[in-house]
Amino acid sequence: MDHKDKKGTTGMEHKTLRDLEHFEEGQAIHVPLYSSERVRVVMLCIAPGAGIPMHKHPGFEVTITPLRGKGMITSPSGEKIVLEPGTIHFAGAECGLDPHNPFEEPFVMVVHRVKL
């Protein structure tokens, strides 16, 4: 049975993330995966050399899960943190985020935002 992008009798929705990846040169692409009243999930596909300026998600706690490639964010103290598969990162509502990809390979991460 193909579960991709289908809701089954259990109420679960299944997506194959690799099929949804989308890159454009010099761009960071948001791919919406799920949205409810309290939770928003996006896949962020960041091409080499691209990124998103420092920003906050007021009223949300954020979880970042790198899937493929490597990226970076800047901690509140200014430290550069490498994002890579096998790690998970948590940010409070007032924590600024600036995901970017200074590396040569595409970078993919999933971002969960949970409303406080």
Image: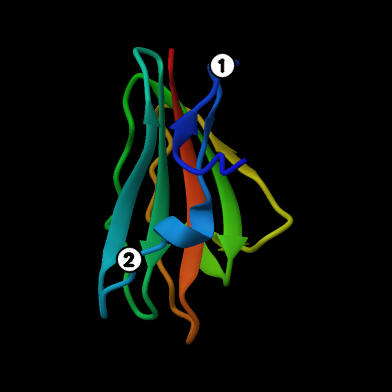
Q: In this image, 54 relative to 6: left or right?
A: left
Residue at 56 percent across and 16 percent down: it is 9
Type of residue at label 1?
A: Thr
State which quadrant residue 38 falls in. top left
Place of residue 70 in the rendered image (x, y in percent of width and height, measured from the top left):
57, 70
The residue pinned by badge 2 equals 51
> Is label 1 in a helix, a strand or a loop?
loop
The residue pinned by badge 1 equals 9
Q: In this image, 116 relative to 64: left or right?
A: left
Place of residue 85 in the rendered image (x, y in percent of width and height, measured from the top left):
67, 61
The local crowd at label 2, few if under 14, some if 14 to 19, many if 20 or more residues have their Cα within 10 Å, is many
Residue at 27 percent across and 57 percent down: it is 53
Place of residue 86 in the rendered image (x, y in percent of width and height, measured from the top left):
74, 56
Residue lying at the far front in this picture: please name it.
Answer: 1
Type of residue at label 2?
A: Gly
Q: Is residue 37 above or below residue 49?
A: above
